[in-house]
């Protein structure tokens, strides 16, 4: 198929682009390179440099004719979204509306959307399945939920069918080392831990010591970016074969504490990783992990990286490519 990947130079987007190319699809990337890297652009993919807030650019790109759009161009820092809701509203909500409107005009009917586990908010029960109440506690989560709702109307009124993939905590890098562009100023735990191992930061601030978990720190479900990429490929196949929409979690159905992640990172990197335990971060639930039953059933999704070490090893390899050992 001929696929347009919006945000294809970003961390997850470049991995998804690589996966679609490996599977033999024809791929074009649309990206404004604000958080993505030119170095992440895959040479077999065509590139449109543009911003999703500029409708004309989207229409220009889409006029090339595509079977499907994969949308991964969003701001994704839940904490930041509480301080700067305007940019999340504009980019994540208005930007996605621009994409859907351009798709309507270009008559593209298949859409794969990067949604988030943050649409759920505080867990009522675990594991979190897709029937869990949707009460986001961050504006970021709200922005993703708004798009899921819009998609129901664009399906009804414009025939755009979609798969919304609710990612849990994405981490890891291409195991073959083909993608090495690191995220700029990361705030997620695993890149923060590895920046500390690499000497870019002095220490990891561990948010919270009094959660009701085995060591008092937060528990999250870390899912490898290559497994996420396989999920996107399966989502497109689902749209092609089943001709209906779907919302599905992508997570490995188990969680690790912050201290477990740091301890594993010490083993994987062989480096010292100093920590300072500080207060909880606002809006952080104690424990989050997925049920991925729907993705397994409908997408045949079968995650390969279910231990934290292999996630950290591949992610660390990307750090070593950028910061070689002396
Ligand atoms: C993980 C754990 C922190 C940084 C993010 C997105 C969310 C979703 C999943 C996709 C928590 C702790 C972190 C640090 C720490 N996915 N932590 N020190 O908040 O679970 O969610 O990924 O969209 O939308 O926001 O991820 O990596 O920030 O935190 O102690 O410096 O690590 O408290 O327990 P989070 P995270």
Image (cartoon, rainbow, N blue to C red):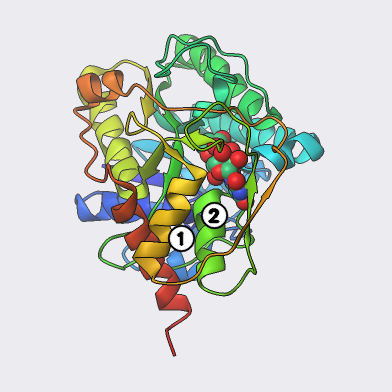
If the picture is divided into quarters, which one holds ligand 1? top right
Per the image, label 1 sits on a secondary structure element best described as strand
Question: How far across and how far down the image is residue 5, in percent?
Answer: 43, 47
Q: Quadrant of residue 306?
A: top left
23, above or below 314, in the image: above
Determine which residue is flagged by label 2: 31
From this viewpoint, is residue 29 visible? no
Residue at x 31% of width, y 68% of height: 177
Residue at x 35% of width, y 64% of height: 268
In the rendered structure, the answer to whether residue 45 lies left or right of residue 54 reads: left
Q: Which mark is residue 47?
A: 1
Question: How far across and how far down the image is residue 153, in percent?
Answer: 53, 12
Are dots 2 and 1 in contact, CB under 8 Å?
yes
Question: How far across and how far down the image is residue 287, in percent?
Answer: 51, 27
294, above or below 27, in the image: above
Which quadrant is the N terminus positioned in? top left
In the rendered structure, the answer to whether residue 79 lies left or right of residue 316 reads: right
Per the image, label 2 sits on a secondary structure element best described as strand
Q: Earlier in the sequence, mark 2 or mark 1?
A: 2
Residue at x 64% of width, y 61% of height: 185
Q: Nearer the viewer, mark 2 or mark 1?
A: 2
Please tell me which residue lies in front, 157 or 192. Answer: 192
In the rendered structure, the answer to whether residue 196 lies left or right of residue 84 reads: left
Q: CA distance from mark 2 to mark 1?
A: 8 Å
From this viewpoint, is residue 261 visible? yes
């Amino acid at each position: 198929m001929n696929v347009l990947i919006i945000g294809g130079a970003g961390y997850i987007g470049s991995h998804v682009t690589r996966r679609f190319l490996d599977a033999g699809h024809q791929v074009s990337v649309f990206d404004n390179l604000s958080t993505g890297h030119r170095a992440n652009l895959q040479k077999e993919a065509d590139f449109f440099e543009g911003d999703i807030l500029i409708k004309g650019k989207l229409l220009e790109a889409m006029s090339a004719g595509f079977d499907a759009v994969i949308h991964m161009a969003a701001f994704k820092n839940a904490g930041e979204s509480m301080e700067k809701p305007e940019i999340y509203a504009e980019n994540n909500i208005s930007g996605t509306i621009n994409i859907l409107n351009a798709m309507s005009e270009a008559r593209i009917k298949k859409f794969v959307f990067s949604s988030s586990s943050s649409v759920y908010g505080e867990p009522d029960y675990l594991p979190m399945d897709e029937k869990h109440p949707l009460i986001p506690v961050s504006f970021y989560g709200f922005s993703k939920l708004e798009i899921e709702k819009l998609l129901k109307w664009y399906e009804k009124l414009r025939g755009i069918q979609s798969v919304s993939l609710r990612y849990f905590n994405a981490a890891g890098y291409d195991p073959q080392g083909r993608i090495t562009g690191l995220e700029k100023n990361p705030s997620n735990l695993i890149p923060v831990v590895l920046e500390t191992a690499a000497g870019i930061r002095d220490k990891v601030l561990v948010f919270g010591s009094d959660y009701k978990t085995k060591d008092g720190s937060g528990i999250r479900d870390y899912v490898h970016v290559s497994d996420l990429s396989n999920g996107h490929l399966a989502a497109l196949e689902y749209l092609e074969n089943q001709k209906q929409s779907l919302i599905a979690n992508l997570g490995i159905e188990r969680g690790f504490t912050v201290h477990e992640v740091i301890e594993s990172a010490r083993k994987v990197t062989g480096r010292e990783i100093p920590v300072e335990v500080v207060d909880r971060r606002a809006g952080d639930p104690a424990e989050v992990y997925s049920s991925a039953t729907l993705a397994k059933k409908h997408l045949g999704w079968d995650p390969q990286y279910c231990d934290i070490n292999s996630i950290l090893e591949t992610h660390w390899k990307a750090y070593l490519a950028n910061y070689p050992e002396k």
